[in-house]
Amino acid sequence: MKPVSAMSFLFLERTAVFLLFAASAGLSHAALFEDDEARQAILDLRQRVEVVRGESVQNRQVLAAELQALGKSLLDLQRQIELLKAEIATLRGGNEQITRDLSEIQRQQKDQLQAIQARFNKIEPVSVQLDGVEFTADQTETRDFQAAMAVFRNGDFVNAQRLFSSFVSRYPASGYSVPALFWLGNAQYATRDYKEAMANFRVLIAKDPEHVRAPEAVLSVANCQLELKDSKGARKTLTDLIKAYPRSEAAVAAKERLATLK
């Protein structure tokens, strides 16, 4: 049975009233129906009105239930929307944290690269020119040699010996090794360790006889011999110096020294 709308229900109700009135008028004036037929018609009409009224109540209940269900659905939807908002806020916060973390990682990587580059720069070989000789050396070699020279220039010959001796041991193939031997010998000579000084000067001469410091090293050997009262050995060393390096300033000094020995 199809649901009856409110308009239909009102129409039927009014029709029933009209028929009841008409039936009453007919009874009074002996009109359309017999009494039994009129009563039956009224009963049928009343029954129909009750049915329509029941259907209307049922429709209102159905509508109320649907409205309640719709309200519940709306509340559920609202809760879902709030949950989505919260989830979006969480995701946005997570993205912001990821962005901050990424920035921090990039900063750390940059710092590490700069530190590595700085360390590389410290050990990267550099071109050095010393005593007329050009060579490459690690920056640590340059630093250690310059530190030893600074101590020597300050007149601390004991510590200069230690530093130069350590340098020669640590960097035997360095381009600084010959100058280090020369200044080591001079530091030893200054502390009157003539034998050790003479030994290191001779190591220098044997290592690189063409080095610019070689003639001075030979002259220093002769000086050590003189300090050790070895005049004969000194004469021979000075003579060999003049023959080996005739154009050097050391050869000029050797000739003057020989003249005094005679």
Image: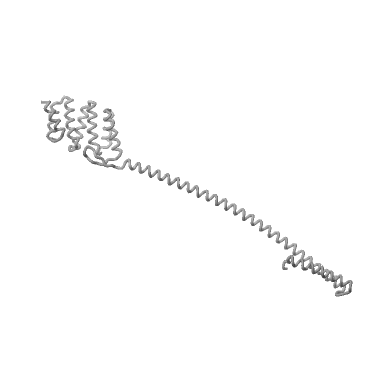
Where does residue 108 sit, x and y in percent of width and height? 42, 44
Q: Is residue 18 above or below residue 72?
A: below
Q: Where is residue 52, by image quadrant?
A: bottom right
Where does residue 248 sit, x and y in percent of width and height? 15, 35
In the image shown, does 229 or 119 lie closer to the viewer? 119
Q: Is residue 157 above or below residue 73?
A: above
Does residue 237 appear anywhere in the picture? no
Q: Where is residue 195, by image quadrant?
A: top left
Where does residue 25 sit, x and y in percent of width and height? 87, 71
Horizontally, residue 153 falls left or right of residue 35, namely left
Where does residue 244 sit, x and y in percent of width and height? 13, 35
Q: Is residue 24 above or below residue 64?
A: below
For the N terminus, the image quarter is bottom right
Name the image colouring: one colour
Q: Where is residue 17, by image quadrant?
A: bottom right
Does residue 140 appear anywhere in the picture? yes
Q: Residue furthest left?
A: 262
Q: Is residue 18 above or below residue 177?
A: below
Q: Residue furthest bottom?
A: 32
Horizontally, residue 244 falls left or right of residue 112, namely left
- Residue at 17% across / 31% down in the picture? 219
For the C terminus, the image quarter is top left
In the image shown, does 107 or 198 lie closer to the viewer? 107
